[in-house]
Image (cartoon, rainbow, N blue to C red):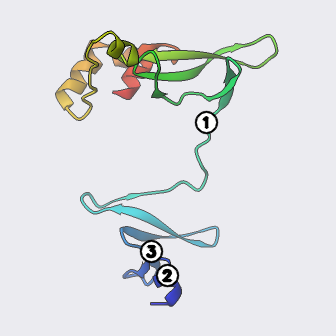
Amino acid sequence: MKLKDIYEGKKKGADGKACWKGYRYAGTEDGKDKCVAVSETLGLAIWEHSEPVIFQEAEYQGRKVKLNKPMRGDTKKFKVYVNTGKKNKDGTIQVKKVNFGHGGTSAKKAGQKTMRIRKDNPGARASFRARHKCDQKKDKTTAGYWSCKKW
């Protein structure tokens, strides 16, 4: 092993290429060696994209927001900013804020319990999706669409 590899925390695998512990060699990309994470329990490799995911930004009430990226909410449990498909008078994208989920801070202030999302329970997940008719939700400007997407 080279001193440089020890310094960078790399070890040589069976193929003779250097990667970190928990990663495997996946060829070269743009002249550089590419290492990908390996899940030992399932034997899966997590591939990294060479290009970062870029969220479209727009302006909502005078500030820049990322579109179609759910985040923790203020009046409900989650919120997301979406493109309405319309334009403002100045030609910019018209943005709508969609609040979804049960309660959030407003429920806590009222003394109500907030509901947990039990995605890891297959029965609860199937019941939620059937009850809310998630296969019919297509409009991104509705809370139902984003609730189903979270589930």
Q: Which residue is mark 1?
A: 55
Foreground residue among 115 and 67: 115
Foreground residue among 80 and 30: 80
Residue 69 in picture, x, y percent from top left: 52, 31
Q: Residue at x 35, y 18 (%)?
A: 134
Q: Is residue 5 above or below residue 128?
A: below
Q: SS of the residue at dot 2?
A: helix
Q: Is residue 71 above or below residue 14?
A: above
Q: SS of the residue at dot 1?
A: loop
Q: Is residue 16 above or below residue 151?
A: below
Snapshot quadrant of residue 105: top left
Q: Residue at x 59, y 56 (%)?
A: 50
Q: Is residue 93 left or right of residue 52?
A: right
For marks 1 and 2, give the CA distance. 36 Å
The amino acid sitting under disc 2 is: Tyr
Q: Which residue is mark 3?
A: 19
Q: Residue at x 29, y 61 (%)?
A: 43
Q: Is residue 138 visible?
A: no
